[in-house]
Amino acid sequence: MSHFTLLEIWRPRPEWYALSNQKKKDFVARSGEILGAVIEKGAKITGVYKCRAASSDGWDMMGYWEMPTFDLVSELADRLDKMGWNRYFEQINFVGTATTAEDYLKSLVVESEF
C-alpha cells in the first residue's frame, strides 16, 4: 500500500492574536477533534516542531504526517479549512510519496518516448 507524507508549515495570522483566550481554547478543541478523526482513519503524526527562531520568514511550526491515502490528506485540509483554520493561520503544505535518492536520480535521465 502506498502512503503519502504531508509536510505542513504554518504561522499565526494577526486574526489569531485578536481572539480571546476562550475563543482560542474552543478553536483548539475543534482542531483536535478533526486531528483525532483523521488519526482514527490511519493518519499518523510523525513529528511536530517549533521552528520560528531558525526559520526564514517567521514560520512558527512544522508538522509531518504519514497518510495512507491522498484522499485523507484532502479530507484533513478540507475539514480544517471549513472550520476556519486558514482564517487564523497561514499555511503551506507539501505532499509526496517515498522514493530513494537512487530512484530519483535515475528518473532524471529517463529517455523520453518522443
Image (cartoon, rainbow, N blue to C red):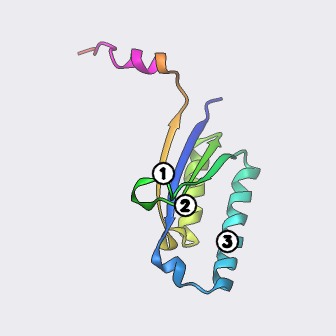
Near mark 2 (Cα within 10 A), the count class, few <14, some 14-19 or many ≥20, is few
Residue visible at 72% across and 44% down in the picture: 42
- Separation (CA) of disc 3 from disc 1: 20 Å
Residue placed furthest toward the front? 53
Which of 55 and 6 lies nearest the eye of the viewer? Answer: 55
Q: Mark 3 sits on what residue?
A: 28
Residue 93 percent across, percent down from the top left:
48, 51
Sequence order check, earlier mark of 3 and 1: 3
Residue 96 percent across, percent down from the top left:
50, 37
Q: Mark 1 sits on what residue?
A: 93
Residue visible at 40% across and 18% down in the picture: 105
Which of 10 and 73 lies nearest the eye of the viewer? Answer: 10
Circle 3: element type: helix
Q: Eyeballing the image, is 16 above or below 39?
A: below
Residue placed furthest toward the left? 114
- The circle drawn on residue 25 is none
Q: Mark 2 sits on what residue?
A: 78
Q: Nearer the viewer, mark 2 or mark 1?
A: 1
Q: Which residues are magenta?
A: 103-111
Q: Quadrant of the image for the N terminus? A: top right
